[in-house]
Amino acid sequence: MIYFQRNHTSPESQKGFSLIEVLIGLVLSGLLMSMVAMVLGQSVTNNEVVRSSAGLSSRMFTLRRILHRDLQNIIPGRPLGVEGNGFSLESTHNVMLKGAGPILINWDFSSNMVRRSEKSSSLEFENSFFLMRGLKSWGIEFLDANKNAWISRSQLAARAMSGKSVIKAFRLTLKFEDGQDVMIVERIPYVRG
């Protein structure tokens, strides 16, 4: 005959977790998970800031490079025209048609954007492209070669009528909506005001 024996164990000898221990474990794991989430969230935010900063830096480098080439290839003796929304010049630097000859280039700073357009009536060619967004304001000053002093665009316009002003360089200030200010100083060869 087979006898079954019941194993009687007391509650003190049973192994396991009490309700309080389980609750404490849940609270601690919840705190740990929230700290990990905060660290990951900050990491993602930092990554986005670095990417946007690198993107702005890259776009600013492109803007400076194109502007520099426009100015270094300016047609000798031609004026630099300054309007309310930007400035224009004649240059042999052409982004789309290499070596196409002199073209009219217009830098436009209206509508919170920086745009550059190029046009040649003799080639029946016109091209425009957008460089940057988020422009809050812009300003331009010119280095007068005769006085060796910076003058505003309104002073340049007043002097240009007399034909006595020769400019050596300009200082372009761009202020963006994100609070970043950029100043570009470029030498201008051959230009009369």
Image (cartoon, rainbow, N blue to C red):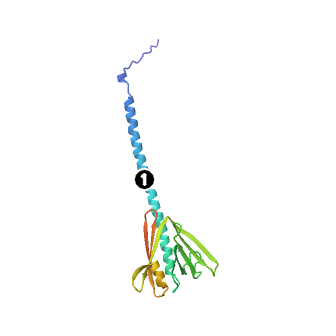
> Residue 146: x percent and y percent?
41, 86
Find residue 43 and report its horizontal and vertical position in percent: 42, 53
Q: Is residue 90 left or right of residue 17?
A: right
Q: Secondary structure at mark 1?
A: helix
The picture places residue 176, in percent across and down from the top left corner, at 46, 65
Q: Left or right: where does residue 190 sit relative to residue 124?
A: left
The extreme right residue here reads: 124
The residue nearer to you, when weighing 180 against 54, is 180
Q: Is residue 75 above or below residue 66?
A: below
In the rendered image, which residue does mark 1 sit on? 43
Please tell me which residue is depicted at 58% across the width and 75% down the height of the picture.
96
In the rendered image, is residue 188 in sight? no
**Is residue 50 visible in the rendered structure shown here?**
yes
86 up-or-down from 26: above or below: below
Where residue 129 sits, quadrant-wise, is: bottom right
**Amino acid at dot 1:** Ser
Q: Residue at x 41, y 79 (%)?
A: 150
Mark 1 burial class by Cα count in 10 Å: few <14, some 14-19, many 20+: few
Above or below for 78 versus 61: below
- Residue shown at the point (44%, 58%) measured from the top left: 49
Seen as rendered, the residue at the extreme top is 1
| Count of picture labels | 1
Residue 109 at x, y = what percent? 51, 70
